[in-house]
Image: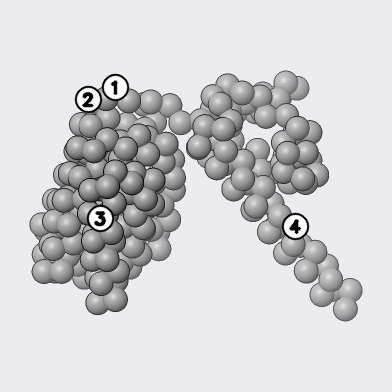
Amino acid sequence: MEEYNLQKETADRYTLGGRVYNAIRDKILSGQYKESEELKENAVAAELGVSRTPVREALRQLELEGLVTIIPNKGAYVTGITKKDIHDIYIIRSYLEGLCAKWACENITEAQIEALEEILYLSDFHAGRGHYDQMVELDNKFHELIYKASGSKILNHVLSDFHQYVERVRKVTLSMPYRAEKSSKEHAAIVEAIKKRDGKLAEALATEHIMNTIKNLIEQGL
């Protein structure tokens, strides 16, 4: 019984640590914690309703991820995502999203295709009514479904992280009527290529889709 309790305690602590890590990470990526802002362990712990230990562990993990800088004897500071980081992420995504779409042609199920078509329908509906919050949510679902359809858990994990890193920028670009409507059309073309199991075309279209986003970012000065 004692051994069981010890294992349970370890599992619970791990779960708490994961929640604290994700909470801090989300606040950094959403801009709630600003670049160069000091993250005081006591203050963050009080805000999240936890002890300092999981906060300290989360900050160390976030330092490895490049989102936080820890200066010995001074404190932890938000590094965040810079403008260069955003452009680097989109360039890398342009290649990986193409590969993802290509592999999706080989592994996607009929149920996943139907789900993508439903997302396309809802995207057109909301784009025509200027419902940009819904557009962002549907964009998330579209890409997440393509990632899963690739059949690669590694590619899914990497691209999902990248998607979260640039969420703030995506919200800005998808709030622009022209880009929102164009993005929906690009999504539709990618789905058609995947339905035809045309890996080469799906790869080219998915790569172009991300490159068009980069062009839009540059035009908007982002």
- Real-space Cα separation, disc 3 to disc 4, in angstroms: 44 Å
- Residue at coordinates 28% horizontally, 59% vertically from top-left? 122
The image position of residue 93, as x and y in percent, is: 30, 44
Q: Are the residues tagged 1 and 2 within 8 Å (C-beta)?
A: yes
Tell me if I can see residue 186 in this picture.
yes
Q: Quadrant of the C terminus?
A: top left
Residue 221, numbered circle: 1
Of 73 and 156, the residue lying toward us: 156
Single out the mark in the foreground, 2 or 3. Answer: 3
Please give left or right for residue 139 compared with residue 199 in the image. right
Would you name the residue on which mark 4 appears? 13
Q: Determine the image quadrant of residue 84.
A: top left
Residue 219, numbered circle: 2
Q: Determine the image quadrant of residue 110.
A: bottom left
Q: Quadrant of the N terminus?
A: bottom right
Would you name the residue on which mark 3 appears? 125
Q: Earlier in the sequence, mark 4 or mark 1?
A: 4
Find numbered disc 2 in the image and state the secondary structure of the residue it sits on.
helix
The three-letter amino acid code for the residue at tag 3 is: Phe
Q: Determine the image quadrant of residue 37.
A: top right
Of 212 and 10, the residue lying toward us: 212
- Residue at coordinates 69% horizontally, 51% vertically from top-left? 17
Q: Earlier in the sequence, mark 3 or mark 1?
A: 3
The image position of residue 87, as x and y in percent, is: 32, 31
- Real-space Cα separation, disc 3 to disc 1, in angstroms: 29 Å
